[in-house]
Each structure stands twice: as C-alpha cells, then as structure tokens.
C-alpha cells in the first residue's frame, strides 16, 4: 500500500468538511492524495468562482491555524454505520471502525495517517479546479508549516 502524507490526508478531511459547510455537498467520492499535490472529486452542479475558491482556502486556513487536535477513536461497525457513511471503507474492514475527529470541525471514518494538530498542516492552497459533466475536481497543495 502506498504511503500517504499525513498533513495532506488531514487537509483532505478539512476540504471535505468545508465543502459540506459552504456548499452543502457530500464528502468527495474520489481522492488522490500525495505529498506534492492532491485532488478531490465532488458531485456538483457547476465550477467554483474565484471568490468561492478564495473563501474555501481562507476557511480551511483559518481552521488549520486554530490548532485543533486530531484524535482517533474506535466504534463498532454497527454503531459507526448509524452515524457515518462507511461506503469508502473496504468491505472487509473489521468490526471496529477508526474515526478521525478534528476538534469540533470534522469527524469521519478513516484508515489513513494524520497529524496530531491542524497547525502541522501548513498553508492550504487550491492550485486548480475544473468542472465537467457534474463533477467538480479540486487540486490542492500545502506549503509546509514553519
């Protein structure tokens, strides 16, 4: 299995939650997470305006700067399925589902590595976005935390 860069993976969670809060989307249905740049695909009705992109970046950077703790907990699959969408988890995932909680901002099931605080993410920057046939793709990168 390919190693995932923890700051970028945690940033994906913040992007997903911010898309939910700002635009009422669901979490991305597809993601490709790498250290230098990553992308998330959303079911969406249009492209984003430059003002919306700036607002999205600003909100995510506000959350990262707020130094929220990133914690893990475990729930039995039956209970986790009542609260969370488990469709992106492997079918053979055992009974205990790992939940990643980022302060009071986001919580979702996840098997990937994460930072311990949002402050470790650095600056979030959308490098491009495009829309085609009901899919909004957002590509982003991180500028390292100091």
Image (tube, rainbow, N blue to C red):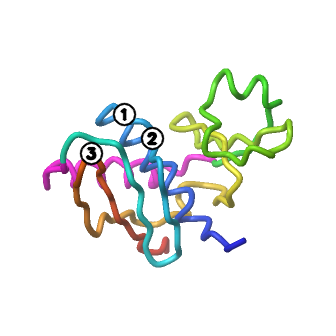
Residue 20 locus on image (x, y percent) = 39, 36
Provide the residue designation for mark 3.
Answer: 134
As measured in the structure, the alpha-carbon distance from the residue carrying label 1 to the one carrying label 3 is: 19 Å
Please name the residue shown 64% across and 24% down the image: 83
Question: Which span of residues is magenta-colored?
Answer: 47-69
Residue position for label 1: 21
Which is the main secondary structure of the residues drawn in magenta? Answer: helix
Residue 64 location (% of width, % of height)? 46, 54
Q: Are marks 1 and 2 in contact (CB under 8 Å)?
A: yes
Residues at discs 1 and 3 in contact (Cβ within 8 Å):
no
Q: Quadrant of residue 3?
A: bottom right
Q: CA distance from mark 1 to mark 2?
A: 6 Å
Badge 1 local density, few (<14 within 10 Å), some, or many (20+)? few
Q: Please tell me which residue lies in front, 47 or 114.
A: 47
Left or right: 6, with 95 as reference point: left
Does dot 2 land on a helix, a strand or a loop?
A: helix
Tag shown at residue 140: none
Q: Secondary structure at mark 3?
A: loop
Would you call the spot at circle 3 few (<14 residues within 10 Å), some (14-19), or many (20 or more)? Answer: few
Q: Read off the residue under disc 2.
A: 17
């Amino acid at each position: 299995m390919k190693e995932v860069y923890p700051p970028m993976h945690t940033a994906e969670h913040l992007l997903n939650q911010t898309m939910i809060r700002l635009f009422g989307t669901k979490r991305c249905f597809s993601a490709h997470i790498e250290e230098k740049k990553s992308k998330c695909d959303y079911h969406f009705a249009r492209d984003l305006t430059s003002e919306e992109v700036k607002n999205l970046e600003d909100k995510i950077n506000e959350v990262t700067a707020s130094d929220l703790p990133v914690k893990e907990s475990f729930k039995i699959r039956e209970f986790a399925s009542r609260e969370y969408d488990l469709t992106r988890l492997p079918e053979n995932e055992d009974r205990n589902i790992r939940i990643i909680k980022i302060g009071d901002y986001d919580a979702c099931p996840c098997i990937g590595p994460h930072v311990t605080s949002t402050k470790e993410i650095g600056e979030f920057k959308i490098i491009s976005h495009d829309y085609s046939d009901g899919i909004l793709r957002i590509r982003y990168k991180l500028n390292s935390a100091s």
